[in-house]
Image (tube, rainbow, N blue to C red):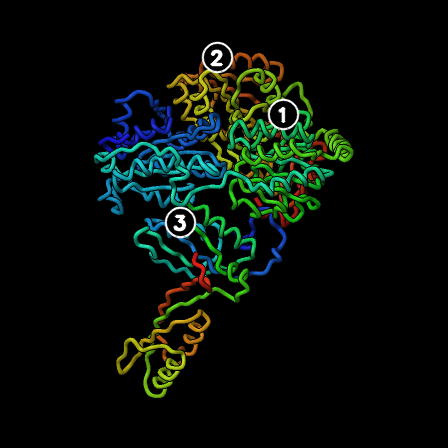
Amino acid sequence: MTREMTGAEMVIQALKDQGVDTIFGYPGGAVLPIYDEIIQQDGLEHILVRHEQGAGHAAEGYARSTGKPGVALVTSGPGATNMVTALTDAMLDSIPLVCISGQVPTHLIGNDAFQECDTVGITRPCTKHNWLVRNVDDLPRIHHEAFYVATSGRPGPVVVDIPKDVQFATGTYQGPTPNPAAAHKSYRPQVKGDAASIRMAAEMMAAAKRPILYTGGGVINSGPQATQLLRELVSLTGFPITSTLMGLGAYPASGDNWLGMLGMHGTYEANMAMHDCDLMINIGARFDDRITGRTDAFSPGSKKIHIDIDPSSINKTINADLPIIGDVGHVLEDLVRIWRSSSLKADAAAMKEWWTQIDAWRARNSLAYKPNNDVIMPQYAIQRLYELTTHRKTFVSTEVGQHQMWAAQFYGFEEPNRWLTSGGLGTMGYGLPAAIGAQVAHRDALCVDIAGDASILMNIQDMSTAVHYRLPVKVFILNNQYMGMVRQWQQLLHGNRLSHSYTESLPDFVKLAEAYGGVGFRVEKPGDLDGAIEEMIAVDRPVLFDCRVAALANCFPMIPSGKAHNEMLLPDEANDEAVANAISAEGKSLV
Amino acid sequence: MNAQNVNAPSAYFLAEVSNEIETHTLSLIVDNEPGVLARVIGLFSGRGYNIDSLTVSETEHEKHLSRITIVTTGTPMIIEQIRHQLDRLVPVHRVTDLTVRARRLNQDKPLERELALVKVVGDGNKRLEALRLADAFKATVIDATTEHFVFEITGRTSKIEQFISIMKPLGLVEVSRTGVAAVQRGSEGL
């Protein structure tokens, strides 16, 4: 389709042609022409957030829960700089995000004009790619390329910066090309894995005595088919499986072969199995430092297969014995086909022995906590929330901190795309806007943000967005009046000197909810919890749920900084002395 | 980033990397568009990689392609990372590690040259000595007064370094260098 239109019209047309139905944004001087088009059209819903960072995270929540790219629209200067955190977040977690920003008119660029900033300069390191559109005739091509770059290969955020005069200018619009990968001059990521390598992987798997599947966010990003294939592979081989924070839900938590999450706050069985395995099959994960612990003691006796679409993930921190570059879904498809069609089988006797060992680790019950009849234990609160919501279509987002780790440990995910959390960047303030994004995409679903009392205040303003658009998101606050994870680290590293990790004057969350036009709950006794959660679910409005939990509970098990997988601090061993001495002098400089 | 972790790929990395530091010459073909050089340089500074030398110019005008030549140092693992990270940039068409290619072809090094303009001020014997040495190095005089010479010299980095250090006691006042341009030996093109 080719026709004359203004730059602002092109933006809307290109979004529609890319199949976008929702954008999250905030108007301002440099995007007014685009906003003027938004109000004169149907088919593209705009959600007005209360802070640009919220637009970014809401778009991330939308993207993560749907598998489609999220779109945000912001103005120049502060609008763009407020997006930086969300862009970086999407960069580290590989979330497809298209951010359109307004810019001062071309002739004012470089003049320190009002609300001018070097948006492409500022966002260069926190995007997969970005563009400054200097000519209206380039706008359609760049727009479509932006969607291609954001969604193909390893997904990520992109920024299209459009000066105001370009939005007003008239040019010729062209629709998207049918095959952008073939048309692109330089960016053509490899999706199909090398056949010989996949065959070798299958042979290594058949020969393994103590194998483990270590999966990550790449499985989710690859789409529902990858999840299906992963489940098929597990049932074909009988291998144990663990996942990173970002990969939860790809394999169901109720599945027999599930070991729970691995890493710093992962289960004992997952980390011990990673340490002692003889074959590690990394599928769409990146050996992040929260996963490996100290790299020189990481799984010393294993061969490692690494499946990743991004060649720069290979050998970045951990050497791969067999790298396979490609999309997880494509590689798994080939792997499952080869496994089925050949005479390859898992070593049954060895597997029996391996599972006996794993069951012994499981019996350690590393997530155990002391129940309490008077005070709500945070773990108990998550368990109850899980039990009372698991039969529904539920999307769970989180903020960052102890509550996030407890959610990952105690909320069992059965499906992909239901778990929205800030893994790589660890962004407090992510959860509420992300839940809003998920709720916009799934109006009939239950969207819960598991939050902490500190994190929720970082983007609390978007309660107003939720009320405005009748998005009944439920903010489930584990309120211990501390920045719990900061305090936990101060106990571990800094002689229990709790520097600025206690919040003196928290707002009254019930009144706060009401002030925004939502509904507030406060629960202080374990006996009242179930009833209140059920009431919360039944309410058809946004909720702030102030769940008062044991103030000093800490998050275990934990691999202390500078330690290996087999040196975990377990909950029943974590007395004050063990906590104070858990981290060596060397480990203290690490994050 | 604190000093002890400068080369650490992970916050948890405690052990010293035992791999030896190598110098490699990378050749990049990129779209000649605004910001492309900033992307390349930003990647090096953002991830803590070294740039010993960087040269850039448009080499194919009709396709708007530029060639960037980077000389960098690091362990083999880091250099492999650099190559993949560069390849990930959208406007980068191709990254070639010329040092690795030369090794595969059993060659010592790729062909590498740089050009320097060297200004030397002096009189009497020093002036004569500077001129004699320039002749020995096949440097040419491209500007002169009774007080100074400007020499143009082309060669491998080691030759340029040597020439400059010899000129120091003879009245060296200014040096401008292009950085390394490099191609693979033999008939094969990139």
Q: Which amino acid does label 3 sit on?
A: Arg
- Is A350 left or right of A9, judged from the image as shown? right
Of all residues, the one furthest to the bottom in this rendering is B125
Q: How far apart are marks 2 and 3 (CA)?
A: 49 Å
Identify the residue under disc 3. Answer: B39
Crowdedness near tag 2: few (<14), some (14–19) or many (≥20) residues, C-alpha within 10 Å: some
Q: Label 1: which residue? A: A253
A349 horizontally vs A233: left or right: right
Which residue is pictured at 46% across the width and 36% down the height?
A155
**Mark 2, secondary structure of its residue:** loop
Q: Which residue corresponds to mark 2?
A: A539
**Subunit under mark 3:** B
Q: Which of marks 1 and 2 is nearer the N terminus?
A: 1
Say what amino acid the circle numbered 1 marks: Ala
Q: Determine the CA span between mark 1 and mark 3.
A: 41 Å
Mark 1 falls within which chain?
A
Location of residue A303 in the rendering, given as x and y in whole percent from the top left corner: 67, 44
**Quarter in which the N terminus of chain A is drawn:** top left
Amino acid type, mark 2: Val
Residue at 43% of width from left, 22% of height from top? A441
The correct choice, above or below, for A368 with respect to A92 in the image is above
